[in-house]
Every structure is written in structure tokens, then in C-alpha cells.
Image: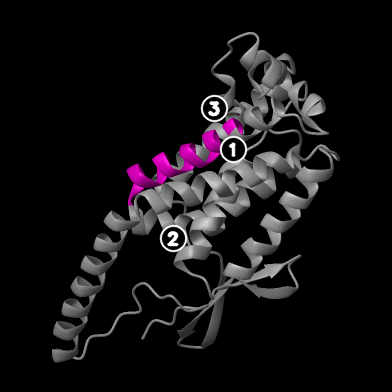
Amino acid sequence: MRARYPASSGYTYSFGPGPLTPAIKAIVIANVVAFLLSSIVPALTLAFGLRPVSVVGGLQIWRPITYMFLHGGIFHILFNMLALWMFGVELERMWGSRYFTRFYFVAGGGAALTTLFLSLMPLPFADQLYYSLTIGASGAVYGVLLAYALYFPNRPIYMYFFFPVPAKYFVMIMGAISLYSSMNAVGGGVAHTTHLGGLIAAYLYLKRGSRSNLMGEIKYRFLKWRINKNRRRFDVYSGGRSDGPSRRVH
């Protein structure tokens, strides 16, 4: 995602949405610290990862939250934190840190509950899922991606870094892949049921708060209109928030 800004000597390009916002910065730091600790003491992954048999049978109720801060390798945490930054920063700026943090944990916790629920169902992969260990922030990140697609449906996302796909279709593709994979098997170390659960939890949470979000959006649009109206009186223009694929500041 690139934004183009005119400069005195031509054009400059920037990658991503800008600096880390407070909540995302705290989440990234927590994930990095947990990753380093689990690398030094691998038993932490077994003690705090999401394992349905331990939650249901052992009543280890902390696991549906703590699993989000553990990762299986450097690329696992790198891509999750990169996606959180790219798609979450603008949401936090729009919602505020408190609401974004609550949404993040609802998506990640909902993803864990989906995994627990499916592990108890009479499904072909339920037994394997019941004894499996799931780690990573992917469920919460998928929820953030869904929210991004709902608010900015036509923003291009470069799938595999080469193919531009509108955000709304990108989420549909990722959701379909997770659904298909979860119906067949839990393989390759990727908990597709958790990804799917993050999408569902995020959608339900946003739908529940759609009325208040709608009123907030209306208030935002009205305030933005008044500010821009006053700015035009003094020939002052600002790029502000944009729903397009790029933001140009005049």
C-alpha cells in the first residue's frame, strides 16, 4: 500500500499507514516479548497455547487469550504484526485505542471459542482439533482485516505482493480458503478454524455495534464537512482521512 506525496523535488513514496498507534504498539511489544520468552523457555508455548483438551478438561481458562501472544517462528510473528500494522493503524485512528483494543480481543477470543466449539462437534477433524495446540494472533488479525474491508471496501490489497485485489474481495477469498480448509483438515500447522472464527467474531461484534458506529460515522462526516467548509473560506486544504487507495495532501 503506497501513498504518493508531492515534494519540492518531485514525488516521494511511503509504505504503509504511518507510525504505530498506541494500542497496536502495545500489542506488538507484548507479542515480541512473549515470542522471545517462549524461544528461551519453549515450555511456555505448551502452557499458554490454545489446547481444547486443556481448556475443557483442565479448566485452563487463560489459554483462549494467552495463545494470541505466542508464535511458532520469526516469519509467523513477522507477518502477523506486519498485517496488524498495515490494516489496524487506520482503524485505531478512526475508532480510538480503547474500542480498537476491545475489538482486537473480541476477534481473537471469538476465534478461540470457535476452535473450542468445533473441537467438540461430531466432525471429521474434531478429534485432531481437540488435542491440537494453536498459537498466534492470526484469528485477531483476520478480524482486523474484516473490519478494514468493511470500512474501506475498495482499497487495493496486493495479494502475494503482486496482484491488487479490492479489500472486500480479498477478505472473501481468505474466508473461503479458511472455510474450505477447515472442512477438510487441520494441516500444515495452520489453524484454519481459528482464522474463520476471527472473521465471524469480528463480523458479529461490528454488526452488534453497527447502530452506534453508524451514528459516530455520521457525526464524523458532518464535523469533517464543517471543518472543510471553514478551511475553504481561507484557502486551506488538507488531505485528512480518505477512503481511496491513496491519500494526496495539497
Name the residue located 58 percent from the left edge and 74 percent from the top edge: 2
Q: Residue reaching furthest front?
A: 122
- Write down the quadrant of residue 222 in the picture: bottom left
User: Distance from label 1 to label 3 (Cα)?
Assistant: 10 Å
Image coordinates for residue 178, horizontal then vertical, percent: 73, 50
- 158 horizontally vs 189: left or right: left
Residue bounds of the magenta highlight: 96-113
Disc 2 + disc 1, Cβ < 8 Å: no
What amino acid does circle 3 point to? Answer: Ile
What amino acid does circle 1 point to? Answer: Ala
- Sequence-wise, the earlier of marks 2 and 1 is 2
Q: Quadrant of the N terminus?
A: bottom right
Name the residue located 19 percent from the left edge and 71 percent from the top edge: 223
- Sequence-wise, the earlier of marks 1 and 3 is 3
- 50 horizontally vs 151: left or right: right
| Residue under numbered circle 2 | 90
Name the residue located 49 percent from the left edge and 52 percent from the top edge: 203
- 239 horizontally vs 245: left or right: left
Give the main secondary structure, helix, strand or loop, of the magenta stretch: helix
Q: Callout 3: helix, strand or loop? A: helix
User: Distance from label 2 to label 1 (Cα)?
Assistant: 22 Å
Give the numbered dot on residue 27: none
Image position of 16 with respect to 27: above or below = below
Image position of 169 with respect to 238: above or below = above
Q: Is residue 102 magenta?
A: yes
Tell us which disc is closer to us: 2 or 1. 1
| Residue under numbered circle 1 | 111
Residue sitting nearer the eye, 250 or 244: 244
User: Distance from label 2 to label 3 (Cα)?
Assistant: 24 Å
Q: Quadrant of the C terminus?
A: bottom left
